[in-house]
Image (cartoon, rainbow, N blue to C red):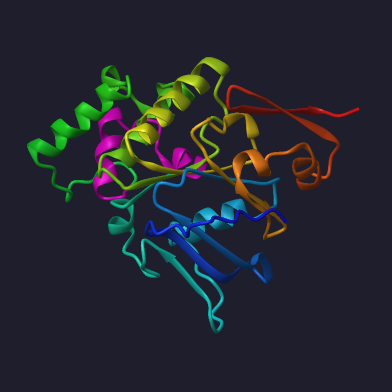
Amino acid sequence: MVVSHQEHPDTRPAMIDLRNVTVCRGSTPALEGLTLTIREGCHTVVLGPNGAGKTTLMKLLSSELYPVYRNRTHAKVFGRDRWNVRDLRSQLGILSHDLQQDYLPDTRGINVILSGYYASIDIWKHQEFSEDARTHAGTIMEYLGVGDLKNRAFGSMSTGQQRRLLLGRALVNNPRALLLDEPTAGLDPRASFQYLSAIRTLMESGKTVILVTHHIHEVPPEINRAVLLKAGQIFADGPKKEVLTTKNLAALFDYPLRVIEENGWYHVIPDR
């Protein structure tokens, strides 16, 4: 296991604070005895193969799942272990593949953004939006380069356009941090780098980003910490450069591979 040791303790507030957490899917532990602290401002990737527990971790952080009750166990996000979903979304913007599948094809682009105010899927008659809220939603669409999609149907958009709208949905509440689940899955290279460029800009502006993925190539250079997850437990954790090594990733994915790093971007190739 790789562990980072700092000469001076990090005093920034803990955004994610998990202690001895076990989460079961059915009768099987998907996370077991997990302890993890991520502080505000620490851009982090959680990397692991399919079945490592990444989806369970996402659902735990978004309050869709809760840990098994045990002594000395807690799972806190921004210092709290219980959240109203709408309140949580105002602090932690969550983007996942499941969310993209939840929207009906005829949902208007502007409604995707507005739905972020209520953490709902589409908007409903009982929901009220001020003129300022609608203006803010439009401003976010322009910022993300999708201002011309206000009245377009969600199902008629490209995957990249849909992904940008969902990012806008998360940003409408000006959250302190973003939790991203495989953000470039299904995107071609051009759309991938355009999307990652938007994410990098947000990190530079002060948004903390936690990226959960098994695609090492979508880890932007601004990510400074890597947590490797395997079989529901932390396999390695520390500074990105120390963790994303050939030895660690070959063991993580149980496959002979080699890590290549260039300009802060990482890739893997088969190792003969």
Q: Which residues are magenta?
A: 95-120
Position in image of residue 29 (x %, y %): 67, 68
Position in image of residue 87 (x %, y %): 28, 58
Residue located 25% across and 44% down the image: 173
Quadrant of the rendered structure where residue 239 is? top right
Residue located 55% across and 84% down the image: 71
Residue located 53% across and 81% down the image: 72
Q: Eyeballing the image, is 68 above or below 131?
A: below
Residue located 70% across and 52% down the image: 51
**Magenta span includes 136:** no
Q: Quadrant of the N terminus?
A: bottom right
Furthest residue toward bottom? 71
**Magenta span includes 104:** yes
Furthest residue toward front? 7
Position in image of residue 205 (x %, y %): 32, 34
- Whether residue 25 appears in this view of the structure is no
